[in-house]
Amino acid sequence: MRIYELSKKYKIPTKEFLELLKKIGIKDKKILSSLSDTELSKIEDYFQKQKIKKPKETETAEKEEAKKEEIEGIPKEIILTGNENVKELSKKIKIPSSEILKYLLSIKIVANINQTIDKNIIQKICENFNFIPIFKEEKKVEELKEKKEPEPIFIPKCPVVTIMGHVDHGKTTILDKIRNSRIAEKEVGQITQKIGAYKVNLPEGSIVFLDTPGHEAFTAMRAMGAKVTDIVVLVVAADEGIKPQTIEALNHAKSAKVPIIVAINKIDKPNANPEKIKKQLSEYGLIPEEWGGDTIYVNVSGLTGEGINELLEMILLLGEMLELKARINCRAEGTVIESYLDRFKGPVISIIVENGQLKVGDPFIVGHTYGKVRAIIDDWGQRLEKVGPSSPVEILGAHEVAIPGEKFKVVESEKEAKEIIEEKKKEKSKVIPVRKLTLKDLYEEIKKGDIKELNVVLKTDFYNSIDAIKNIIEKIPQNEVKVNIIHSGTGPISESDVLLASASNGIVLGFKVQIDPKAKEIAKKENVEIRTYDIIYDIGDDIIRALEGMLEPDIKEELIGQALVKKVFKLSKDMVIAGCVVVDGKVVRNTKVKIIRNGKIIFEGVLSSLKRFKDPVNEVGYNNECGIGINNFNDFQEGDIIQSYNLIEIPKKLKGV
């Protein structure tokens, strides 16, 4: 019998049961560990002794109860303000109003239930009914108005799971098998595919599955700061073994510090070899529990359904061990999974509620839009009035669609929601892009103490190059900062590589590889540095120079435009203006300029004055006339070419971005 099965038998949570085993001398056990007959006898003996002890505990409890009854006659303290009327006093001391009025008559005081009583009289009433009054002044109105944040109340939440793995290794088949078993739970009902997540209810608990296209979507959400997933299930085909995309998915999950369960799929195949998979993945740190590690492995078949129930059971067990919690007594908040525009419903936002209870009518903000919850639709398509944590639902009522990964928050009122979003939109124009780490500024970050680790995504032309580069990096002294290769592989630098670097505040290094156009776009948007090299030792040299603060960027001239001098106007001794026509691109004020005469550069300076007719302007476009003035230069001649350009810094060896 395994540990988790035995913990069920004794109705003790698995984590507590493992602690109990340590106390009785059974150590180094995991949730999938088996027990010997001797160990089982030891556990049985322990619980037998516990049963014998129970009557004594009951006896002690009875004695305590008796003591309570003995001291029942002792007066109880009661907190009062001294301004109570008969009715209020009756509620506080839990004595009927009629009894209090009867006592007042006995001391010759006639009163009614709404009459405020003198503090001295309240004292007498309390003493008569065996109470000791403690008078405390009422709080001022201003104090009462102050809203105090209630003590957080946390409840257990069900795990949110993402399934990852190599293409064709059976992720979809497993998800379909789970879906089918789920649909069988209800006699009527059609699963909705638009919600992006769905819940599976089992006798032992529930699980939410994120129906995403794998590690890229997972990491894209992480790059936005969304940490929705609690557990990753890594699917590997038993007949094929690990593939490049398996390792990529594994590194994305490890980088996010999310626990991993390995599902060895296709065990129904005649050439299935689960032990080979365990050996391969052990080299990447996923050591099975039965080999002394911490990773749970489950053999499954998405085709036949074999092992699917055990997989679900293991997810719940790991969720229990993680002690996942959600706050319940707060305004609802969650994360956007998907969003789309429906021609009848309007903007539809799919979210997973993470904390609080979401109700119809709640005003909310999400990303750069807001609204009021008009409807809550669960993953069965049913309309609900309210939902709690770990619930995948569709929300109707937003003014616009939202981006996956954005935060959803309930606020006080629609007015407040509108004000927050308007303020966000104002700020958006001022927003400076999030500054990501570059090799050039690494030294400054180390000096400030902000950086302890340089995360690197490495892509090379051949596998042999990976080991060679790793050896070079390992030889670099890492006293100040650890150089951590979070993912390595062969082939072009992809969108997935850039997303992983973005989510980990890392950089991408490439050796003799190209950069995918989409990866370039995302790198620019996410401010991720990509460096490519043709000489292997340059990679190590650049990292050393960065660690020593000596890495200088390359300077590149970026031509903006050119103007041809048509006429020269001498306005004064020190002021000469060139009448020009723009023949290429545009000319821009305050940029650097070169003056070309007969194919040679005769002067370099700054374009200090730019006019269109008589009006000063910032720039003049192609085929337009303008007047140009240049600091410290008056010797214009007709036929001169004025080139307007910028100087841009490019990190050394940077290509393509």
Image (spheres, helix red, strand yellow):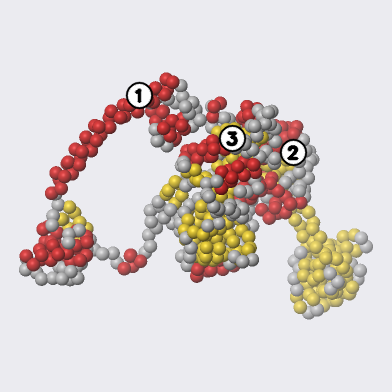
Give the mark toward the camera: 3 or 2: 3
* Residue 599 image point, x, y percent: 92, 60
Could you say which disc has been placed on residue 267 in the image? none
Q: Nearer the viewer, residue 128 or 489?
A: 128
Q: Which residue is mark 3?
A: 306
Q: Report helix, strand or loop for mark 3.
A: loop
Q: Residue at x 84, y 76 (%)?
A: 570
Residue visible at 40% across and 52% down in the picture: 152
The quadrant holding residue 80 is bottom left
Q: Any mark on residue 45, and which?
A: 1
Task: Determine crowd level at label 2: few under 14, some 14-19, many 20+ residues with C-alpha closer than 10 A.
Answer: some
Q: Residue furthest front?
A: 187
The residue lying at 58 percent from left, 46 percent from top is 179
Q: Amino acid at mark 1?
A: Asp
Residue depth check, mark 1 versus mark 2: number of the one nearer the observer: 1
In percent of width and height, residue 393 lies at 54, 56
Which comes before the other along the chain, label 1 or label 2?
Answer: 1
Residue that badge 2 annotates: 490
Q: Is 235 on the left or on the right of 133, as rendered?
A: right
Q: Residue furthest right?
A: 598
Q: Determine the image quadrant of residue 421.
A: bottom right
Name the side, left or right, on which 307 lies relative to 156.
right
Q: Position of residue 219 (x, y in %)?
A: 63, 47
User: Which one is earlier in the sequence, the residue at label 3 or at label 2?
Assistant: 3
Q: Label 3 sits on what residue type?
A: Glu
For the question of whether residue 27 can be seen, the reply is yes
- Looking at the picture, does residue 442 appear above or below residue 643? above
Closer to us: 566 or 458: 458
Instruction: Give yes or no for contact between labels 1 and 3 (Cβ–Cβ under 8 Å).
Output: no
Q: Secondary structure at mark 2?
A: strand
Residue placed furthest toward the bottom: 614
